[in-house]
Image: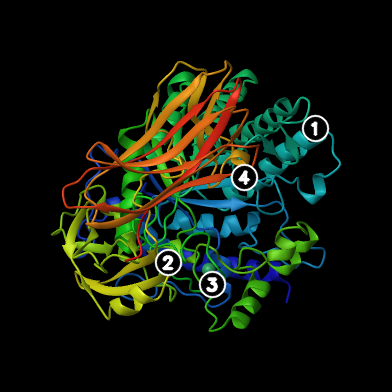
Amino acid sequence: MNTKKTIQILAGLLAALSLAACAANPEETVGESLYSDAPGNAVTSDTLYVQKVENLPEDFILGMDASCVPALEAGGVRYYDHDGNHKNVYEILSDNGINYIRVRVWNDPFDANGNGYGGGNCDIENAVTIGKAATAFGMKLLVDFHYSDFWADPGKQRAPKAWQGMDIDQKSEALYQYTKESLQKLVDAGVDVGMVQIGNETNGALCGETSSALGGWKKIMQLISAGSKAVREVCPQALVAVHFANPEKADSYVSYGKNLAYYQVDYDVFASSYYPFWHGTLENLSQVLSNIATTYNKKVMVAETSYAYTAADSDFHGNTIGEGGGIVKDYPFTIQGQANLVRDVIDTVANKTTNGIGVFYWEGTWIAAGGKSYEENAALWERHGSGWAASYAADYDPDDAGKWYGGCAVDNQAFFDPQGKALESLKVFSLVRTGNAIENKPDAIEDTNLILDLKGEILLPETVNAVMLDNSKEEIPVQWHDVDAEAMKNGGVAKYTVKGTAGGMEAVCYVSMVNYNYLQNWSFEEGETGWTATALKSFDELYVEDKVTDSVTGTKHYHFWGAAANAVEFTLEQDVADLRPGKYDYSISIMGGDGGETEIYAYVKINGQIVARGDTTITVYNQWHTAAIQGVEYAEGDTLTVGLYVRCDGANAWGKIDDAMLNAAEE
Ligand code: CA
């Protein structure tokens, strides 16, 4: 069956559903928000902690991109509310505080035989279907034009098939006409279009034009202006948004703002993606957006954000973030962690950003296609376009989608479980307005990483870090299970995973058994940290250098050079306290040249007195020499100092020092 036709049939079905909803509550469908006008239907939760976002304006946008719903439903996916009732997913979203739906639009995401490229096969008909449902449940629509036949993002801004080969004036005219015709379809269908986005993550490229080409910015801004003009004509009440990604590159946002102003682009909203695992801190986000807002007097918002509620995949297609992750950034991969991230993004835009108007979550409804195996899902992805790309996308994007087509990479970031039931975290969009201060308790356990000395005791920590419901951290007791200390001690250099229980949850400790190096910053990767260099004569260069070819480990090492003869003389030392009593070995490596007559030795001091020394020298470039001392006695309370003494008589004497090691000695 022709996929495009399937979508159109589904569009008819959903339209009928919307009409049924209208008939039941005719007066409510025209209101700003069904949810806010529905007392007695308040969202409550016994398990989700939500810190209230203060001063949240009534019309603050709490939006959801939900572009894949029709494709998923065509393949049999159903959505259920928190009580397990099968409902229209847009009603569930509205009931939980979502007041805006975002939908991406591709010009022609189909091959010549009508097979969809996937990713929801999001053409304008799909947007009409979704827009009507959103309007029926009192939500506005943000129309996200990619001006491409498939995914447009910072890595890809390919022009639609029909526009390839056009010059910039022809392309601008085509974009203008296409925007007008597409918006007219939405208006004719009665969709409440609140905002229109001209391009998606247009980081210096749009519709086949790039800023790196001569006159590139001018062409990009001409295209955006053409889209904006169409919006003003067809949807004069709608806001015009531009959209960029990578706010962590603050300079690029400054440059986008300048170009938009220089080319006098008519827009209302400067929108940014914010994926916390890629896009820097919330503080930075609010700074770069506020800068645009105040410099150009524009509204700003987050057009895309998301976070994982679980590390697990549910559709046999690997996820963007998740597996092997554990706790990343500032939030655990839990339902509470997902809600906390959303709450904090909303708070940042609402209260810490100038002219912040809203936050859209990206594809919170994109769940597994519903098959019981990879093969079953793959068939659904191909037939209905419910995966990120179908094999048919090779027609348009042969090098990426054509090769790596498959399922959903964000099913673990949805607000619905793999069976389509709403997660508790979805309630955050409503509860941010009131707060929901339930009793604080552990929500997730941070993994523990431990490096243990093969010659020391096998001691696992008695506490682990718990992330609490309110995202604070507390140390709580842990019970480790089945620790085979003998095997770990006698197993040589190796890694172990020890499991335990803390706060009723699983705790994991990753143990690396090593010949432990008791020196800090032993290969100078942290610069001078822990080390004291003392020049005993005045000479030219003595510092940590970052040069991978001159380092044994990592990229850094200690460097010295003196132009004059008899110039170089220095010591490099580190103090070590609180060692376990016993015997220790020390070594340090050096290479260099033009030393003339040299005196170079490693030494160990106990309580300030040299007790052992090991001589070495320098010869030529890249020939490393190791000075070593074995079996120094350390007693309780001693301070041990390791050092290297260097004296060179030659003119232009130079050298590099790396890899200082202090290990427990063999008994
Ligand atoms: Ca997946």
Tell me, for residue 73, which label it has, or none: 3
Question: Could you tell me residue 26's position as x and y percent?
Answer: 38, 58
Q: State the residue at coordinates (65%, 37%).
A: 621
Please state which of the two labelled residues, at mark 1 or mark 3, is closer to the viewer: 1
The response on whether ligand 1 sits within 8 Å of label 1 is: no
Relative side of 216 to 433, left or right = right
- From the image, tell me which residue sits under label 2: 311
Q: Is residue 326 visible?
A: yes
> Judging from the image, what secondary structure is the residue with disc 2 in?
loop
Quarter of the image where one finds residue 89: bottom left
> Judging from the image, what secondary structure is the residue with disc 1 in?
helix
Looking at the rendered structure, the kind of residue marked 2 is Ala
Label 3 and label 4: CA atoms lie apart by 24 Å
Label 2 and label 1: CA atoms lie apart by 45 Å
First in sequence, mark 1 or 4: give its number.
1
First in sequence, mark 1 or 3: give its number.
3
Looking at the rendered structure, the kind of residue marked 4 is Leu
In the displayed structure, would residue 375 be above or below residue 512? Answer: below
Label 2 and label 4: CA atoms lie apart by 39 Å
Q: Are marks 3 and 2 in contact (CB under 8 Å)?
A: no
Q: Is 177 in front, or is 496? A: 496
- From the image, tell me which residue sits under label 4: 183
- From the image, tell me which residue sits under label 1: 168
